[in-house]
Amino acid sequence: MDWLTAFGLSAVTAMLVFYALEDRNPAYILAFAGACGLASVYGFLQGAWPFGVVEAVWATIAVQRWRKRTSRPVIS
């Protein structure tokens, strides 16, 4: 196994773990977003640019979900 394959395997494994833990704490949503970003980098380095684009979109969606979940309602 070369370094690029190991990097991709690690990124996708982290995605799976953090996705499973998202309901426990909003920090896991942000960690999932970071893992998606790493998977996106892997996709581009490997030459599978569609995978890289999709993972970048997932990272963006996850960051937005994290922001929504951690925003405090304004009490007036």
Image (cartoon, rainbow, N blue to C red):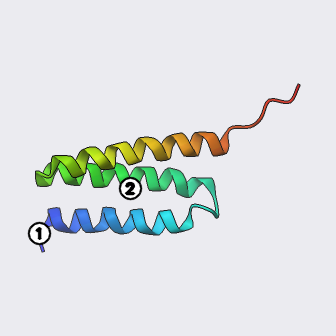
Earlier-in-chain disc, 2 versus 1:
1
Q: Nearer the viewer, residue 7 or 43?
A: 43
Quadrant of the rendering where the C terminus is positioned: top right
Q: Spatial distance from mark 2 to mark 1, Cα to Cα?
A: 20 Å
The amino acid pointed to by label 2 is Ala
Q: Nearer the viewer, mark 2 or mark 1?
A: 2
The residue shown at (51%, 50%) is 30
Where is residue 72? Give x, y as percent. 74, 37
Where is residue 69? Give x, y as percent. 65, 45
- The label shown at residue 35 is 2
The secondary structure type at the circle numbered 1 is loop
Where is residue 43? Give x, y as percent. 20, 53
Number of other residues with Cα within 10 Å of mark 2, as a class: few under 14, some 14 to 19, many 20 or more: many
Write down the residue under mark 1. Answer: 2
The amino acid pointed to by label 1 is Asp
The image shows residue 40, relative to residue 15, as above or below, that is above
Q: Relative to residue 70, is residue 55 drawn left or right?
A: left
Q: To which quarter of the image does residue 9 belong?
A: bottom left
Number of other residues with Cα within 10 Å of mark 1, as a class: few under 14, some 14 to 19, many 20 or more: few
Q: Nearer the viewer, residue 8 or 60?
A: 60
Q: Nearer the viewer, residue 50 or 20?
A: 50
The secondary structure type at the circle numbered 2 is helix
